[in-house]
Structures are given as structure tokens and as C-alpha cells.
Amino acid sequence: MPYTLWFDKAGKEALALVGGKNASLGELIRAGIPVPPGFSVTTDAYLEFITGSLKDRIEEILSKIDQQDVVSLDEASATIRQLMAKTPFPTKMEEEIGSNYQALSQVFDTPDLPVAVRSSATAEDLPGASFAGQQDTFLWVQGIDEVLENIKHCMSSLFTPRAISYRIKMGFPHEKVLISVGVQKIADARAAGVMFTLNPLNGDPSKVVIEGNWGLGETVVAGLCNPDKFVVDKVTTVVEREISLKGVECVFDPRSRKVVHADIPPDRREIQCIEDQEILELARYAKKIEEYYGCPQDIEWAIDKQKPFPFNIFMVQSRPETVWSQKRKEPVLGKKSVYELLMEKALSTVKIEP
Amino acid sequence: MAEKKGFPMPLEVEYPKELQGWEEMYPPTYLFSKERQEWEEKHFWFHDKIHAPEAMYPLDLIFQEAWQISLSQYTTRVFCIPPAQGIAQRMVGCYMYITPVAPPPPEIIGEKAGLFQKRVFYVFDHYDELWGMWLKKFRALGEEMEAIKVPEDFPKFESDDTVFPEPRGYYTSFEVMEAWDKLVNLMIKGWQFHFQYLNLAYLAYLLFTDTCRKLFPGASESTIGKLVAGAYVQMFRPEEELCRLARLAAAVPEIAKLLKSDLPAEKKLETLRKTAEGNDWLVEFEKSKDPWFYVSCGSGWFHYEGSWTTKLEIPFGYLKSYVERVERGEKIERDLPAIDKERAQLAEEYRKLIKTDEDRKAFDDTYKAVRTIYKYAEDHLFWVEHWFHTIWFDKVREFGRLLVKRGILKDVNDIYLFNRFEVPNLMEDMATTWALGEGVPSGAKYWQAKAEKRKKILEAAKKWNPIPAIGTPPEEIAEPFTIMLWGITTDKVNEWLKGSAVAPADVTELKGFASSAGIIEGKVRVVKLLEEITKVEQGDILVCPTTNPAWAPIFTKIKASITDIGGLTSHAAIVCREYGIPSVTGTGIATTVLKTGDTVKVDGNTGIVKILKRA
């Protein structure tokens, strides 16, 4: 019954313990991909936290919800989440999380190392993304107290109004849905974003499509900006690029100690946010990750501000791409022989629109 | 609609008055006419910048006449590409316009489909042996042309051996006329062979492009070109032969020294003939020369381009630099196995990205088909446009010399001012005048006046910027050449519409085939004739009408190339991909629009050349 597991110790076999996101980080590490280090707070820890009177109170509140009444749903959610926030973790659990966090801080020789705290659900691949709760991410969390608070906050995201109502609607028992939380060194990103191991616009499997912006990746993930876009051919490594006018970046503000949206200064707005060598290195990792998983992936990446190339490139997330992967299981060319294809071509014409 | 967009109707085209009289230079069927007005107005005619970018000398039109028939008949009557018809030509103010003929009625398409299937699949299955037969047949044809005897002059009296023991019965007058007719017929026949498999090769290329685009929607033109292009194609043989001769020369210090000197080519040959080693080398030189130095210095389409055999300074110039490079220990040969291996690897890596067995099989099969038959598109080019045309130009020059000698024309090249139906009149006049005896005037004054007038018209035509298109844009095109060579798409038509109003100096961007990937900025060097190639400096961006093996050695010096003519598998495209330098081919207007010293950005990924700064 471990409360925590380091990422590199838990891959897909530990999915039930660490959830999809954390397990995939474990897999990436095993594939030799650079991933910022960290650990999972397991579903066992969650189960142990939600026991006894806390469990009873939650069940009681849930049982009183009037499905038709939105206000009652909101109130129930708020009450449960406050209750969880107020309830301390069992001492042993708190100690184990604390010592892991300290160990992580020591590796980087930084007291109160800034980390990202993210929920990692076990039922992520079930239909309906809201099933397990909101995919909460807290950035730039520093100090053990903040870490513990945000872990709890991630756990309680299982009880957002949407998550609760979805489970009720689907007839899925609340107690069957578990959650793990990842605590990961934050990639202090100069630029970050997402990439696909195929072209999401047309399904072209010979391309890696990279989208990036200055700062942390959230602006790209949430679609808050027009990112720079790079289409890299997997074979020839030829890069096609679209450099966008980038207005907003997501950065850590040391004064407010918060991650904020900041205007990008004019001199950086139209500058390509990642260098050519970084583009090629990212594409190389994309290919490697796709090969490791054996199916197309949707990957989040970050370029560290401090480290020199190529040690500045990190993957922070990878999940299977679903839209085109499904389509591509069927032959694109429709099982035709070369003669049938030739006949088809010979009969074709090119339309010219006057 | 067409008027609104700015393309005039065929009979409404206006010419500068200096062009007056241009019509008489070309066969009457080449003119837009009232009699065919309805049909002509239904079609969309565009200036063929690929094959006839310049004002057309009447006799050089023979190749165009020949391809109009040959290309079209293979599509319509031989291999029967179902919805496609031929490509028709017209002359407008000394420039050639072409149109893909509208598709035939549905019942014809159905009939053709059956024939297509039977005949084309047969060719695809038997291509390798068929190529061997083609080459044998074609070389025999070229040898027949080479064997045509053109008398150096008409004799004062026919010799005794044409009289004894039996008077021959026909004499120089007939021989000259017969020789000319034979020369023309062989040229037309050669062009019948030219398209024997070419339409099919292009169709296979289009098929493979389609397959790639379905599997990899973003596959670039240059990648597809690189997958298809062969390393072992005959167009590279001239360069390979030069390398061979350079190595032989480098092994003999005196020969190496001679070839490195700045003496004229003729002087070098003369010196070589004086020593045993020199003669040994010359034996090898002669072996290479026929057929491999029968390469045009241009596209092979125009008499003024010349060839390595008529401009010996060019191969000897290359030999000089090759010998120097060999002595510096550099490798001068293209590494063919490596190029072939690289291509095979490229194909294998794309293949691995295919997800299903069925698709992999379709990819393999279409790839095999195109790799088999596309060789034809690469190989025929050397044999027809270069070897065969070089023989033609040599022979025509002999006739030209004879006409000058007999006082009919003033200059050897004036023969090109008369079309192939007119030249027999000149021949007949020359023969008749000789036959009539002493003191009889020929039509020389008439011909020479015509020649003078035509020279002026052509000079004026060269200064004229012909309109890009005439008539109504079509709704659809099926003719594989139109699609592949001219890249006719909505974009292209719009481009013409846009471009038609812009003067060359105001153009800011050129579009062509994205032939070799990469982006680079730099200064351009415009080289219209191969003789100017010595001016190219290290790191220039080469801008030229077209390139071929005669240009090959320059590619180690330049950092990008832009051509007027040529597709994805043109010589410039293939060589640039090998050297990893960007190339945009088939822009149509690069040598008109760009001036040496202009700064441009060449984007070989998109086929766009941006003019950044005018010199």
C-alpha cells in the first residue's frame, strides 16, 4: 500500500495506482525520453484519505442531491470540497509526501522547489472527459504546505458539480472512481506547447506537427493564443513553419507568486519561439514516443529556460491521439490493386473553377 | 466572364504593329481563324512557356508540330486515356499557345476505357523489354538521319561514275530535295517514337503522386520527385563520360597539363594528335563523343542553343576543372550507389509509416510501376531532345551551308526563318536554278527579302511580352501532360490573370515547382546561354532557362537554382536534390523578371521565389 511512487517506478502496469497521466510519464521515462522528475500520490493514498467519517459525510451529502436542482448540486459540491480541504491527511501519508518533496528539492538544490501538481485519473480513457473530475493542474506550487493543499484540491476535483452530475446520469457509483495526483518539478519554460505525431488537420502520418508559444504551455493547451506552428516531415525532416503574432504568454510572477498571463513584449511577438535545432529534437522525440507506444500520440513539451541545448527539452505529457488513429485502421486506398488505381486515375479529371 | 477576367478571345488579340506579317511565317492551320472560331473560342489557350518560351523561328516549329500530332494520338488513338484528348497548338504573334482539347462524349470514354486497360496494362507489365526494343529502334533511326548525305555543293557537271556503266537516272537536284524530305520525315518519325511511352510514364507518376497524397496528404512535390527519380538515367551519362576522360587525362601529366591550359579546344585537339598518348586519349574521347556529347547546351528545342559537339569549348572547359579537381584529390563522380541507396531508404522510411497491409501493398505496387516506367521520361530525353536533335541541327546546318553556297540565302542560319513546308521551295528553287544552266537567276532576292523581314519581325516579337492566355478557362482537364508539365490548376489560371497586368520589373514573387527542398537567400546570376556560365561565382543563385547535363558541373558552385522550364524531375531538380540545395523550376519567367545581382529568397519547399531587393 504505497502512498507515493516515483514516476520512473510506475508505468502502465501501475495504472490503477497512479492514473493515466502519471503512468504515461513513467512510460516516457522508460522509453528514454527526458521528463521532469516527480512522484505520484497513489489512489491507495486517496482511498486511505477518504475513510471513516469523511467517507460517511460525503456519502450523506451526495445522497441528498436533488438531480433536478442545480443549486443543490453546486452546494453539495462546495460542501464536500471544503470538507476535504479541512480534513488533514493521515500523518504517515503527510510525512511520506513531505519527504518525497524534500528529496526532489534536494536533487535540484533548491529549497521549496517549484512543482506542478496535477490530477491523474484512473478512468480517463472512458468516454466523457468530465467523468473523473476536472483535470486540475496547479503550477508553481512551492513549499510542503502548498503542495499538500493542492494535492487535496486535485483529489476533491472528483466532486465538481459536473463530475458528480455526470456520474449520477451514467449510473456510475461515486466510490468506484479514484484519483491519483502527480507532483512534478516544473519545467521553467522559455517556450512550451503541444505536438502531434501526425498532422491533425489531415491525418498525415508522415508529419509531426508542433505548436508552441513563449512561456508555459498552458496558453497553447487552452487555446489562448495563436501559437507558432511547425510541420516536420518525419523522413526528410523538412520543416514548414507558420510564425504567428503571439500576444499573451503564461509566466510565473515572482511578486504575486502566481502564474499569470502576461503581454508578450513587442520584440518577441513575431519571433519564432523555438530554435530550428529544438524543432528537430522535438520531432525526434515525437517519433521515438510514437514508436514506443506503437500508436499516434498527442504530446505536451517544454523548453527549459536555463539549461543548454539539447538538455533543455522535456516532455511533460503524452496520450494517444484518437481521431485519426481510428480512421487509419482502414486502408486509405480502399484495398485496390495497382490496375484499379491506375484505371481510376486514368478516368479522373482536374476540375478548374473559372 | 473571360473578358471580365482579362483574357481576350482568339480573334481579338492585339499585336504591336512591328509584328505585322508574322502570320505568313507559320503553317496556315496554326492561325486562329473565322472558320474554326466557334471551337477555338470554347477552348482556353495558354502560352506554352515550357516548350516555346521564346519567339518561334519557323523551322524550329517542327518539333512542336511533331509533338502536337504524336502526343495527342497516343492519348486519343493508341493508348486511349479515357477522358483525355489531345493538345492543340496555335501561333499568336510568334508565340505558341496550346489548349487541352475538351473531353470526348461519354460513349467514346467508355470505348477508350476498354482499350486503355488492355494496352496500357500490357506496357506496364513488359516495360523493361519494351525499353530495349525502343532504344534499338530509335538509335537506328538516328543513325539513318546521320547517314543522310547532303552534298557540299552542286557539281558543275555530274561525275563519270553517275553515267557509267549505266547512267544513274537521278542526280544532285533530286538527291538534295530527297535528302531534305527524308530529314524532315525522320524528325517527324522520331517524335512519333518520343511519346511511345511518355504519356504512360506521366500517368504512372500522377498515379504514384495520388497514392502518396492519399497516404501522406502533406507529401511534398520534391519528396515525391526524389522517391521517383533514378540515379542511373542516361541524362547523366555525358557528365559521367567527362569524369572518365578527366581521370584518364589526369593519369598522364602532359595531357593533364594541356587540358588545364587556356588554349582553345581546337588547339588542344591539334596538340593531342601529335603524341601517342594524346592519340590514345582521343580514341577514348571519340568513344564518349558519340552519342554522349550530343547534348544541347539548352533544352534541345532551338537551333541557336548549340551542342557540346558544336561548342567544344564547353566540354573542354569542364574537363579543365575536372582535371584540376582530380589532381586536388577530390571525388568528381556522382556516387550512384549511394544516391540509389538513399532513395531506397527514403522509400522504406515512408513505407514504415503506412498503417495497413493493404495500403502498403498498394504503395509497393504503384511505386514499382512508377519506378519501372518513369525511367522512360528520364531516358528518352537524352535520346530524342539531345542526341537526335543534335544530329538534326547538324544536318540542317549542312543544308544551310549549301543554300548559302548557291546564293539562295545569305547566312547559314537563315534557313530557320522558313518553315518546314517552305524549305522544300528553297530546295527546289536551288535545284531548278542549277538544272537550268548558266546565267539563270534564282529566287534568291525574294527569299532574302523574306528572311530580312522575318528577322525584324522576330526581333520585335522578342521585345513583346505576349499575353499569358486567350479564351475561356476550362472547367476540367484530364490530359496528363497538361496537368503534370504545365501544372494547370485554378491557381495557375488565377496567377496568369494576376500576372497578365504586371510588367517584369514590378513582379515581386515567382511561382514554380518546389523541386528541391530548402530555403535560402542570396544574389542571383542570370545565365541565359551556357557560354556565360564562366561568370558564375561560388555561392550564386543560378537563374537560367533550363539546365541539362551540359550544365551539370556548375552545380557544385551554386547555392540554389531557379529555372524557367522544367518540372520536378527535370535535370536541375534532380541535381539540386542530390547536392541538397534548394531549387524552384518551371517558373516560366525567371530569366525575364530577374536581373543579375537581385537579392531573392528561394523557397524550395513551396516553390516560391521572393524578390527581396532589386540590384
Image: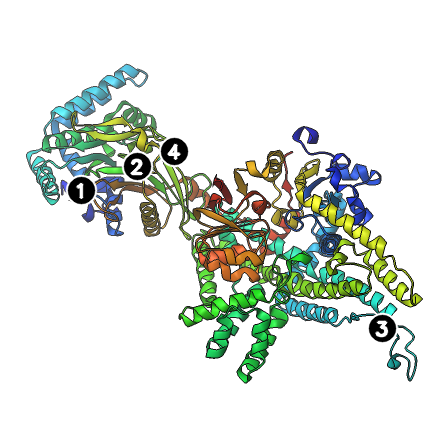
Reading the image, the residue beneath label 2 is: A124
- B5 on left or right of A193: right
- Marks 3, 2: nearer the viewer: 3
* Residue B361 visible in the picture: no
Marks 2 and 4 on same chain: yes
Reading the image, the residue beneath label 4 is: A244
Marks 1 and 4 on same chain: yes
> Chain ID for label 3?
B
Q: Locate residue B388, reporting x and y percent.
A: 68, 65
Q: Amino acid at mark 2?
A: Glu
**Marks 4/3: CA–CA distance:** 80 Å
- Marks 2, 1: nearer the viewer: 1
Q: Amino acid at mark 3?
A: Pro
Q: Residues within 10 Å of mark 3 (few under 14, many from 20)?
A: few
- Marks 3, 1: nearer the viewer: 3
Residues at discs 1 and 4 in contact (Cβ within 8 Å): no
- Marks 2, 4: nearer the viewer: 4
Reading the image, the residue beneath label 1 is: A38
**Marks 3/2: CA–CA distance:** 99 Å
Determine which quarter of the picture holds residue B3: top right
Marks 3 and 2 on same chain: no
Q: Earlier in the sequence, mark 2 or mark 4?
A: 2
Q: Secondary structure beneath disc 4? A: loop
Residues at discs 2 and 4 in contact (Cβ within 8 Å): no
> Chain ID for label 2?
A
Q: Residues within 10 Å of mark 4 (few under 14, many from 20)?
A: some
Marks 2 and 1 on same chain: yes
Q: Secondary structure beneath disc 3? A: loop
